[in-house]
Image (cartoon, rainbow, N blue to C red):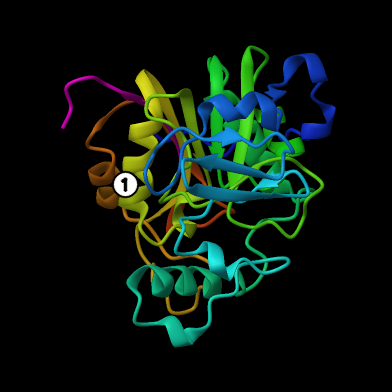
Amino acid sequence: MSVPEHSKTLDPSSIPAPEQARLLSLAEVVPLLASPDTRRPLSLDADGGSLHAGDERFPVRSGLPLLFPARVQPFLGARELEVPLAHGRDALLQYVFLSLVKQRGGEANTPHDDVNYLKHIHRARVLVREARGVVLDVGCDSPRISKAIFPAGTSYVGLDSTYADAAQFRLIGMAEFLPIRDAAVENVALLTSLDHVLDHHRALDEAWRVLAPGGMLYLATLVWSERAELFHDHVHFHHFREHEILGALARFSIETLQRYPWKGDTHRSGWYLRARKVDGRA
């Protein structure tokens, strides 16, 4: 369903705290956590300096749990992952290297005071207004801002792959290796983040895995009808076509889908959809 361009914008700072999701702390999130490699439940060490599952260990730096796969852990730099090109023969490290190239391509997020970002906040808040329970926000940007999208009655934890800013609590990891136990959360959100993930099929498989039966996926992304070449895009891995999104969501039951014009363009639109994890789908 296509809808007219919505002129209304919403500044997240104007949303009263009682109408927002509650931001979970590390202690509250630990019961949801699992190794990104083995999916064994994680426990927090007594000193709070790391998480462990048997002999697996994951550091907590400045309050942020760094939950990358074990093969990636040796490349934890002070402010970002540092994977040299010399490791290009290791498929996983090559994959992470390519992701880092895109992260360094330029500013990935629209400024928070931009009118198009404020329109996104309004549309996303309409999309998720019926959410309840725990929300895992994959590619969360600023948790303080993003939690305002979700309504009272939800508990919020963000996940992002960047950790230079330690001022806001979130999980640090990859959409392709979610450090969350099976069927542990009621909601997964990918709000303008899926096109930054190289293996978007794997990311959606992971969202399916961590969702409880009947849980909800909230997805906002651009969908392109033409002029979708990627060779001039510095930060995205995908310019999705309609069939790519619908095909990738075949395991889910799409319940709502709104298509909005995007910045006055005719070659792409913003899709905001809600899809349920339905038992019995392969």
- Magenta span of residues: 270-282
Let me know if residue 120 is in the magenta part.
no
Residue 281 position, x and y percent, is 18, 27
Residue 50 placement, left or right of 214: right
Q: Please state the total of marks drawn on the protein image.
A: 1
Up/down of 15 relative to 111, above or below: above
Q: Main secondary structure of the magenta part?
A: strand
Q: Is residue 49 above or below residue 280?
A: below
Instruction: Give the camera-side residue of 147 and 261.
Output: 147
Residue at 33%, 50% (x, y): give it. Answer: 202
Badge 1 is on which residue? 245
Residue at position x 65%, y 72% in the image: 106
Q: x, y (%) of residue 200?
A: 36, 53
- Left or right placement of residue 11 versus residue 97 in this view: right
The residue drawn where x is 51% and y is 57% is: 265
The reply, left or right, for residue 220 in relation to residue 6 is: left
Q: Give the amino acid type for the residue marked by disc 1 in the picture.
A: Ile
